[in-house]
Image: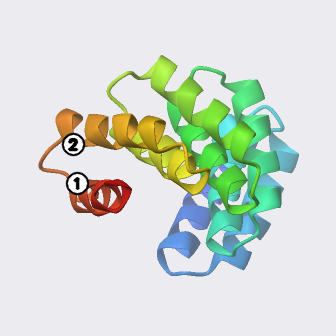
Amino acid sequence: MEEQKYNELINQAMSAMRNGNFEKAIKDLTEAINLNPEGASAFSFRGMAYGHLGKFDQGSKDYSKAIELNPNDSTNFLQRGLCCFYINQYEQSINDFTEAIRLRPDYHLAYMGRGTVYRELNQNVNARNDLEKVISLNPNDVTLSDAKNLLSNLR
């Protein structure tokens, strides 16, 4: 019964997020977490909702818990890396993007994130390497134009 309620709350939260109601999503996900504190997906989705509200510190904490519960999910490392970038925790951000890449070597979004952090830190060689990797991994992806723009600014 609790598993069914947990899943219903996750579905309600996802619907709320699709509708831009991130506060309701957080409420539903918090209730889901209270029902099942070992459910990594609820922490991950709540981290996402916090991120949409610009609450990156809280989002980072939820992604940390999701990583603790499911350390092989590259997406949680990517998302925590983004949160850390937005709160100027650049070293942690780079570490998270690097771990996402270790778990999924073709994860072009992780290369894009790490390259962006390197660019912010004026580590232009590292930034260029990562942004070129984005292009080589998936030349038809929408992030390609972003990577090319960032690369052109590094030259």
User: In the displayed structure, would residue 67 be above or below residue 47?
Assistant: above
Q: Report the residue marked by disc 1.
A: 144
Can see residue 73?
A: no
Which amino acid does the dot numbered 2 rest on? Answer: Ile
User: In the displayed structure, would residue 109 be above or below residue 24?
Assistant: above
| Residue 155: image location, x then y, percent | 31, 54
Image position of 113 (left or right of 4): left
Q: How is the image coloured?
A: rainbow
Q: Secondary structure at mark 1?
A: helix
Give the alpha-carbon distance from disc 2 to disc 1, as whole Å. 6 Å
Q: What residue is shown at x 54% (from left), y 45% (from top)? A: 118
| Residue 7: image location, x then y, percent | 61, 48
User: In the displayed structure, would residue 125 be above or below residue 122?
Assistant: above
Q: Report the residue marked by disc 2.
A: 135
| Residue 94: image location, x then y, percent | 62, 37
Kindly identify which numbered label has been placed on residue 82: none
| Residue 107: image location, x then y, percent | 37, 33
Sequence-first disc among 2 and 1: 2
Q: What residue is shown at x 59% (from left), y 47% (from top)? A: 79
Residue sitting farthest toward the front = 155
Residue sitting farthest toward the left = 140
Can see residue 19?
A: yes
Which amino acid does the dot numbered 1 rest on? Answer: Leu
Q: Residues within 10 Å of mark 2 (few under 14, many from 20)?
A: many
Contact, CB < 8 Å: mark 2 with mark 1? yes
The answer to which of 10 and 79 lies nearer the viewer is 79
Q: Please identify the quadrant where the N terminus is shown.
A: top right
User: In the displayed structure, would residue 154 be above or below residue 123?
Assistant: below
Q: Secondary structure at mark 2?
A: helix
- Residue 110 in which image quadrant: top left
